[in-house]
Image: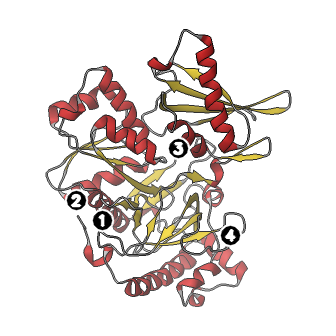
Amino acid sequence: MIWNPEYECMDRAALKELQLRRLQMTVSWVYERVAHYRALMDERGVRPRDIRSLADVSKLPFTDKTALRDTYPYGMFALPLDEVVRIHSSSGTTGKPIVVGYSRGDINTWTELTARVAASAGVHRGDLVDMAFLYGMFTGGWGMHYGIERIGATIIPAGSGQTERHLMMMADFGTTVLVSTPSYALYLAEQGEAAGVDFSKLPLRLGLFGGEPCSEALRSEVESKLHIRASDNYGLSEVMGPGVAGECECACGLHIGEDHFLVEIIDPVTGEPLPEGEEGELVITTLTKEAFPVLRYRTHDLTTLDQSRCECGRTLARMSKVRQRTDDMLIIRGVNIFPSQVEDVLFGIEGIRPHYLIVVDRKKNLDDLEVRIEVDTETFSDIMADMVAFQNKVAEKLQSVLGLRARVTLVEPGAIERAAGKARRVLDLRNT
């Protein structure tokens, strides 16, 4: 379903005119109201009147998490607190949290955009939606909540954790849609299977997944175990939260809310723009945010853009699934490694369960790479030679992709810790 055809199917020339008007208003807004941006623009000799085309966005400064933490808590707000109706923040696990604010208009925009994402995935009036995202300072639960309500679906605000309760409600309430991280959906499937739940007999038909990367292999695993269709969506607290982009039923990329966000793809090293279709770092400028607008926010997410019309009828550009982040990259013995590379190898080997942990340590002044993987009960053997052969097979496949040898450790099902939120895939002990 197309929730808002006026904007989602807008002629791209008209869309670019709208983006330019909104960009000009946003730049004037932050220059007048946010000292951080005014100082950076003054250093560059840039004034709001200098933004005459969309290409002029390159004249504006980048924003990153460092700036947001340095101005903690309210230094990036463009409205006084008495005009801010909601505050969210990041977890702050690596220092001061990033604090973001929303005006009443921002909440309405957020609701509109998450309604688009949910509708494009296939949510409709009459659905019963289990919200298995965390409520609280995290934007995930609250963002999708109001959008789903606006569609007219029924929300079940269960929150994260208490897996037995989720399973009970799916059976007793007739839940049709699940909203969670893909890794939690997989955990839910495992626990349900152990409890004797036959998901094929439940009304559950659709999953809306976000909060962490979801490979095609992981999507297939979730769809197979839960007997649903899985849809991916994208957002980040620094820009708005969920609602920035989402898949339609064609599943050929995530449609970006371009009437509210101006996106660029840049070379993550040089910061220079890259042509359409080339992978690079996603940079986002908000076009309608009032309380917490951001200019050229460097997401560190690597993706590509496609501006061609989708078969669904939408004209909004599509971004490919985010599988890698520039700050997720591990440098081990001089070799650059992304966790997604490890996942792709493991998911292609029969007998390995979709749970793994990459452990990096330093031993005798050298980097040590270990990959712990869960294997099916049937894969375990009393014959040591068979187990060693399986480990070597996995290690060789990893080496062919990564370019270096990893120690492979086989563990029993359930041995790797599960989480109600984002799955922990990397444990780097080198600086502990």
**Residue at point 18%, 35% (across, down):** 202
Q: For the view shown, which residue lies furthest in the left direction?
A: 126
Which residue in the protein does label 2 denote? 150
Residue type marked 2 = Arg
State how far apart marks 3 and 2 are (Cα): 28 Å
Q: Nearer the viewer, mark 4 or mark 2?
A: 4
Which residue in the protein does label 3 denote? 91
Which residue in the protein does label 4 denote? 271
- Local packing at callout 2 (Cα closer than 10 Å; few below 14, some 14-19, many 20+) is some
State how far apart marks 4 and 2 are (Cα): 39 Å
- Ranked by sequence position, the earlier of labels 4 and 1 is 1
Which residue in the protein does label 1 denote? 112
Question: Relative to 402, is 371 above or below?
Answer: above
Find residue 411 and report its image quarter: top right
Question: In terms of secondary structure, where does tag 3 sit?
Answer: loop
- Ranked by sequence position, the earlier of labels 3 and 1 is 3
- Ranked by sequence position, the earlier of labels 1 and 2 is 1
